[in-house]
Amino acid sequence: MFKPSMLSLAVAACCFSVSAQTETTTENDSIEKIEVTGSRLKGVDLEGAQPLVVISSDDIKKSGANSIFDLLKDVGQLRGGDGTFSTSESGATSTSTPAGQAAASLRGLGPASTLTLINGRRVAASSFAAGTQNFVDVNSIPLAAIERIEVLATGASAIYGADAVAGVINYILKKDYEGMELNASYGDSAASSDESRRNLNLVFGQQVAGGQLTVFADYLDRNAFSAQDREFTRSPLLQSSYSYLPKNTPNIYYNSVRSGNELATPGCATELVTTEFGEEICAYYPNEDDQLNSDLTSYSTGAIFQKDFGDISWNTDVFFSNTKSVALSSPAPINQLDDSEGPYADESTLDIFGPALRDELLDQLYIDPFDTVAGRELYGFAFDARFGTPRTIEVETDALRLVSALSGSVGDWGWESAVIYSESKSDQVATKGVYNRYKYHAALAGELCSNGTIASYDADNDSLSCSSGSLGAIYNPFLQNDSSNEALLALAQEMPNRKGKSTVLGWDARFNGDLMEFNDGVISSAFGLEIRKEKITDTPSDNAIARAENGYLVDVFGFGSSLSAAERTQWAAFSEFNVPLASTLDMQLAARYDHFDDFGGTFNPKIGFSYRPVEELIVRASYATSFRAPSLTQAGVKLRTTTASFDCGANQAVADLFCEGFGDERSNNVLELGNPQLQAEESDSISLGFALSLSENSTLTVDYWRFEHENLVDTNMTGVLARAIGDASLRHCGLVPEGSQGISFDEALCDVTDNAGLTIEQDGANMTEILDAWVEYDDPRFAELPLFRDHVLLLENTGQQTVSGIDLAYDHRFDTEVGTFGLSLDATHYLSFERNKAGSDEIEELIGTWRYPETVAGVRFSWSRGDFFSSISANYTDSYEDDIEGLRGRELDELDELGQLNADGTRQVSSWTTWRMNLGYDFAQTTISFNIDNLFDRDPPTAYGSSRGFDSINHDALGRSFRIALSHKF
């Protein structure tokens, strides 16, 4: 039924490199048993019939990778856009990616649109979402257990169901292993700082109880990497990228200064910065506390067991992994109790500067009454500051996966049935830099007791008392390096925690066989059923949750978490056929129906053709529909404290009212709500290409692909602001009432009306006239409608995106008297990436804009002779526009002065090419290898649109690094 062609053998030789020690089956046996990612058919020649990228065991061995993410980061189908992320994006806040975790995103469509499989079956998502997108943490997959990785970057929901919108990444585990192998490696950067990585793994296999047992263990320890460890990230690129909120040495808030300007106080650790208003302030820049990569410790262990009972085979694999990581975010801003700007300090706090300087400062200030936490009235002034310690969290994640399957045959039909249980549990605790807002303000007023409780105030006697402990002194935010003062601050520290758990429990049954004879061949078929139950919970401690009864104020400053819980049951039925239309033309048909108990059903077909006019050429084409069910977090989030951006460049009406007419992006604190009425995201995908065997050792593949992705799920603050202009139900003075949605404005905005006497909360109000009235009434620093906080936004199906491109891969190997040479090239060229602007029907082209390079490519030259092997490879990332639109006017002015802007006001981030070298030698039982990444120590291209000074998604600031590895087989 299956005769290997020259093409299929060439593709296999190109993509698969499996040692004889680990693969003991005969060629004919493996042909009968093979199942290629992207199909449930077995024993059918599908080599070259679909655009499959394979990272072989030999690729893994020579890659220098310490983790799955290291292996995937240079795959062209995973580059471009901001979907794929690593621990470089980890942080302590809810807007950061979960600490120590990494995700893969095909075609830039997002990690939730890429299905992750192990041996063709699902894995539990991380219990901590990235925003509201659930994803599989690839750091939890043990590298030591992986035989190869298969990447199919085209829609595959007709085969695998939900989430395969952009495609599938399938991790194939080792099996039939005989012997023992120990691998150890050490790596570090060439810089003087310590970013070292240590990796140790073991694989052991032998016959046990009449079956084959394979056991593996893996350990990885990696140090953190800070922006302060590199000269080009140590200081800000633009002086104007300052924050008014310094750490350790506060400024006096402009509303408390008679001149109306912010005022620096003595003791600033850095040179004062001149603001756009001519003020001299103590400033803060995020690079001071930026962690470019979090530290990570991971260990994993597991086993694979296979045993035959007559005609029935039993296969079981189980693994457990544990990862620990510490992540930082910049110190939290200090606000008033209601989260508005400018907390108040008692006027006596200026006494530390001595009488002369104190009086000079007081002469410039308004001293106003303010209410304290305990209910007293004191006199003082407002200040601007953030805490001195970065927000720091520790996260520990345990992942467990168990799959047990039986397989056999009935006549000419094969069958397989399996049960699966997979879970991911994460525990997070904030260890530093997080403070209780009530205790902190009590400390500012001298109302915090020595046991950390807030004192009671007796108004009749004008006295404070503590139920236990003693009353503390006033905490002075201007006093530095004083142990007693710091002890008062320590009493306000909190350690909020967060616990999450995600589980998948499933059963499936599959059948394979020849359905009927047709056109001098046979129609091969596969049928199957699946039942799956998924559950996720994400539960923060009470002091990290926004609650309506507390005015949506989180008890701690700058640290909110999402509360979510959801579960769903899903069942599916699928079928697949390979139909020989002619001796040189096959058709692949697949269809799948999935039903979810929370939002209904969806049907997804796929049709593909493979044409072999000659033995050396295969032409392939496919069309498929795919879908992504709303994630459990999106459906079940109760109230997520986060920030949301709105783009004034997307809607001029929004810009005129909320951005002084400018087109910049703004960020605000919001509360996200899950939406059980969300529809599934849907996608149509097509691919067309060919694979050509130019010779026995030379293969060329070219594929065109296109995705139309609709009903994207997200919050849309730009859209809500636009709708609020004409919808009074979305406009609220003060906090949004419980049960309502919309935008929260400064409460005082309702003191003004339009020309018809209508307030902003009333139907028909003229927003432009209200803005004019507000400017006249309040004389604000910025002529825009004053937003308050905690806007309540519902997750919704916000828009669509269309992406297309071309993949090219070439592999050539040739033997000479001096050894075997190889040349391989992989490139992805994006033709288009169109997406509607948030809050607008306007379509924008993303290719060539920030983080969307037009072309990414890699080339590799290899040479081996005898037991020696070597290679040198280059990775190329195309140039693209800097994120200039997200900068404020003052930053654009500075860029213009530096001559960094083009005539049209844009700027390009330069293309980037880095080189990697690999050398190694195979001794009888031992292999030693040496890798150097970023061989020429190239700094990443400058990006003024990032506070880091470079694009940490597409580029890397580590610089030259090395890895030495030793492998020994026993």
Image (cartoon, helix red, strand yellow):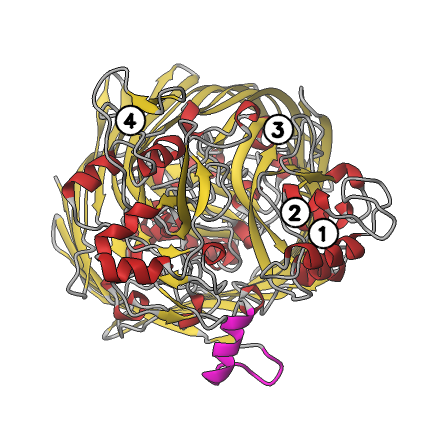
Q: Name which residue type carries label 2.
A: Met
Disc 1: which residue = 839
Does the magenta segment cover residue 899? Answer: yes
Residue at the image position 59 percent from the left and 40 percent from the top: 164
Marks 2 and 3, how far apart in space? 19 Å
Quarter of the rendering containing residue 112: top right
Q: Position of residue 806 (x, y in %)?
A: 60, 64
The residues bearing labels 1 and 4 have C-alpha atoms spaced at a distance of 50 Å
Q: Which quadrant, please, contains the N terminus? A: top right
* Amino acid at dot 4: Ala
Q: What are the residue bounds of the magenta stretch?
A: 889-905
Residue extending furthest front? 461
Q: Amino acid at mark 1?
A: Gly
In terms of depth relative to the viewer, which is nearer, 82 or 798? Answer: 798
User: Sequence-wise, which precedes: disc 4 or disc 3?
Assistant: 4
**Dot 3 corresponds to which residue?**
635
Q: Is residue 840 left or right of residue 908?
A: right
Q: According to the image, label 4 marks what residue? A: 303
Q: Earlier in the sequence, mark 2 or mark 4?
A: 4
**Side of 839 relative to 635 (left or right):** right
Nearest-to-viewer mark from 4 and 3? 3
In the picture, measured across the screen, residue 226 lies left or right of residue 559, that is: left
